[in-house]
Amino acid sequence: MTAHPGTADTAAKIVPQDVPAHASAGGTEAPVFYETKEHHAESSTMLGFWIYLMSDALIFAVLFATYGVLGRNYAAGPSPADLFDLPLIALNTALLLFSSITYGVAMLEVEKRRMGLTLFWLGVTGLFGLGFLGIELYEFHHLIEQGAGPQRSAFLSAFFALVGTHGLHVTFGIIWLVTLMFQLPKRGFIPENRRRLLCLGMFWHFLDVIWIGVFTFVYLMGVLLA
Amino acid sequence: MSAQSERQNTVEHHDTDDHDDAGAHHGSFKDYLIGFFLSAVLTAIPFWIVIYDVFRNPMVGAVVILIFAFVQIVVHMVYFLHLNSKSEGGWTVLALIFTSILVVITLAGSLWVMSHLDANMMPMSPAHMRSMP
């Protein structure tokens, strides 16, 4: 072992038991590992989930582009100004924003390992999510009842495709949330559950980001430029 | 032996830190509160602009609310998704930049190409329209 100090030191990190302690490293000192745990798996899950969200953003980009191209083709039917009820959309936006912050509060309770409060805030988040879905379904029902269903015009087809896809995401988010609310008390704050909560949190906040695009591009600009 | 004690500290830090889900994903309550208030303001102003017809020229209003939307998306990314250039060694930001470029190409490209296609279509008279299949 006549390697120069630099290589001996790096080798010590990888296979410390095979390399005799270096003179300057302190003689009888036990080998020191920089990595005491395997973090890689968890960290790559978060990155992978983020990349899934980015691909989901591309799906929404295509639906937004479709709406942008077809959104003025009313086929002599109703226009956004005739159909959209902006105060209702403002209420819906508020519900989704509230659900985002209550999810954040739930995550803070997870860090403090308080099960009861975590479940409470997750429940509140779910209720806001359900409120959002309820209003959206009411709106869709109201439109279809007026004869402004997806088959009425290209504008309405694009509208239902875009807003419906977002609503479907929220639906699956709520199903995921309820699943975790059962899993959490049963298994506790194990790393797997915390990882799942982090992923759902990213998903939930991401849906709020998409909704910013929806209420601006579809509802507000639709009414403004109709 | 400062290097030795530094190593020891690293080890101790890892021992006490039992949640290995990379600190970058957590925000403080203050972060969420700032994000919430900014979002509330950035949402309320566009709704106010449209409902009360603040701008005489609707195109100006449209550009203004698009800017508000863009700012609010950045606010959500920073305060709710806790995105920063350091999380995951910069890969999340890189993926986001790549996605943003694709989104801009998709949106701007579709609108641009289809509006030109529309403008170059042969004009149709109402009589032609009526005899369409």
Image (spheres, coloured by chain):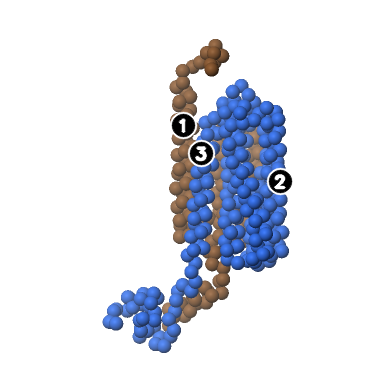
Label 1, residues with CA under 10 Å away: few <14, some 14-19, many ≥20? few
Q: Which amino acid does label 2 sit on?
A: Gly
Q: Where is residue A170 in the image (x, y as percent from the top left)?
A: 63, 47
* Residue at the spot of label 3: A62
Left or right of A177 in this view: B113 = left
Q: In which quarter of the image is the C terminus of chain A?
A: top right
Label 2's element? helix
* Residue at the spot of label 2: A131
User: Is residue B87 visible from the viewing direction of this image?
Assistant: no
Quadrant of the image occupied by residue A168: top right
Label 1's element? helix
Q: Which residue does the image show at 68% across and 32% down from the upper left? A: A143
Label 2, residues with CA under 10 Å away: few <14, some 14-19, many ≥20? some
- Closer to the chain start, of discs 3 and 2, is 3
Residues tagged by mark 3 and mark 2 found on one chain of the structure: yes
Chain rendered blue: A
Residue nearest the viewer, comparing B42 with B25: B25
